[in-house]
Image (tube, grey):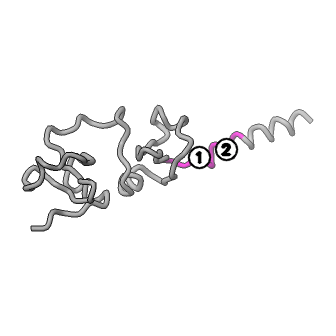
Amino acid sequence: MKPLAIFLSIFLVASASASEPNVKKSESGICHDKKSPSYAQTKKFVPFENVEECLKSGGRSPATTKEKEPADPVKKSESGICHDKASANYSSTNKFTPYRTMEECLKSGGKPVKK
């Protein structure tokens, strides 16, 4: 009977870890992969296969894994427009999600400024 109990325990542990997604996007929009310190604590989430998919959905990297933010980030406004420093509305865009590059902003679903 003991070997059966051991087998079932191993099977249940393996099944539980196999059902965990590779990336969890938390309710606050942070993409946690299995290396993230907050991965295990993230209980309410949207699952993703990889970090790139999570970021494209509008998620962002955890502060602990982010590279230093650039001095002049690309700003994605609440209306979804990506403003770089050359944009006429850059300095007046106060509520925004920062991105390192215009490409990252556009990949997240942002739209370029109409010229």
Q: Which is nearer the eye, 38 or 89?
A: 89
**Is 5 positioned to the left or the right of 107 in the image?**
right
Residue 26 x %, y %: 47, 45
**Is 63 positioned to the left or the right of 113 in the image?**
right
Q: Which residue is mark 2?
A: 16
Q: Residue sitting at 74 percent across and 42 percent down?
A: 12
Q: Residues within 10 Å of mark 1 (few under 14, many from 20)?
A: few
Eyeballing the image, is 109 above or below 43? below
Classify the position of the N terminus by image quarter.
Answer: top right
Secondary structure at badge 1 equals loop
Q: Which is nearer the eye, 97 or 24?
A: 97
Q: Which residue is mark 1?
A: 20
Q: Residues within 10 Å of mark 2 (few under 14, many from 20)?
A: few
Q: Residue sitting at 46 percent across and 42 percent down?
A: 33
Q: Which is nearer the eye, 58 or 34?
A: 58
Residue 99 x %, y %: 24, 47
**Number of marks present in the image shown:** 2
User: Could you tell me if the residues under marks 1 and 2 are in contact, i.e. CB atoms within 8 Å?
Assistant: yes
**Is 5 positioned to the left or the right of 92 in the image?**
right
**Is 112 positioned to the left or the right of 14 in the image?**
left
Task: State which quadrant residue 81 falls in.
Answer: bottom left
**How many angstroms separate mark 1 from mark 2 (CA)?**
7 Å
Could you tell me the amino acid type at mark 1?
Answer: Glu
Could you tell me the amino acid type at mark 2?
Answer: Ala
On residue 82, the disc is: none
Q: Residue sitting at 20 percent across and 50 percent down?
A: 75
Q: Which residues are magenta?
A: 13-23
Reply yes or no: does residue 19 show up in magenta.
yes
Reply yes or no: does residue 31 show up in magenta.
no
Q: Residue sitting at 77 percent across and 37 percent down?
A: 9
